[in-house]
Amino acid sequence: GRGNQNRHWNLLVVATAAQFVRGIPGDFVELGVYKGHTTKFVAEYVEFGGWDKRWWLYDTFEGIPQDQLDPGREGLTAAAYGAPYSYEEVRDRFAPFANIVVTKGRVPEILSEVAPERIAFMHLDLNTAEAEIAGLDFFYDRLSPGGVIVLDDYAWTSAHHQYAAESRWFRERGLTVFALPTGQGLFIKPS
């Protein structure tokens, strides 16, 4: 389990990563938005509205698709999250940011319809190995050298399917993810 005792540290990691890549070519992506708390906090903290970048947010806004649930995590249905925010609520929440784009759809399918050509940052928080690997497959080549990926659930025992799949994905490419005490994984693309 995790509780919220780490939440401020998780947010600080994402905010620091955002600032770190400000000068790196490309937009921002978040796969798995839920209510948009992380992006909203970070966007306000770094004053993203004034940046010459866009932040693309993707979610089903209906929980994890049944066929993408990891074994043992069948409880992570939409109902388990409590009343999910609707697409409209999250879209409206980001209305003050002209450069934040909220997109409803399933990863990876939605990405072939609407996605940036180059990214500097990706926050991966889909809570399912299959969809997160699909997100890595889709966006890795679009990630600029020096760009950052933050894997939200990388080092939690409850997310061991994500950890195993993602560790293997990076290892096969000779790449390293730093496991953080927040449970996040931090990856910086080599030059």
Image (tube, grey):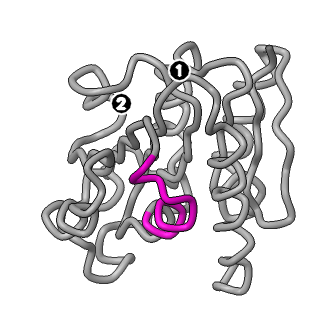
Q: Residue at point 43% right, 36% down?
A: 53
- Decide: is 141 above or below 81: above
- Circle 1 packing at 10 Å, graded few (<14), some (14-19), many (20+), is few
Residue 1 visible (yes or no): no
Residue 113 is covered by the magenta coloring: no
The quarter of the rendered structure image containing the N terminus is bottom right
Question: Residue 106, located in which quarter of the rendered image?
Answer: top left
Assess whether mark 2 and mark 1 are in contact (beta carbons under 8 angstroms): yes
Q: Residue furthest front?
A: 50
Question: Residue 10, located in which quarter of the rendered image?
Answer: bottom right
For label 1, the SS is helix
First in sequence: mark 1 vs mark 2: 2
Q: Which residue is mark 1?
A: 137
Q: Position of residue 120 (x, y in %)?
A: 58, 30
**Image: magenta residue range:** 40-50
Q: Which residue is mark 2?
A: 108
Whether residue 111 sits left or right of residue 156 in the image: it is: left
Give 19 or 128, whichever is nearer the viewer: 19
- Circle 2 packing at 10 Å, graded few (<14), some (14-19), many (20+), is some
- Decide: is 117 above or below 20: above
Chief SS of the magenta region: helix
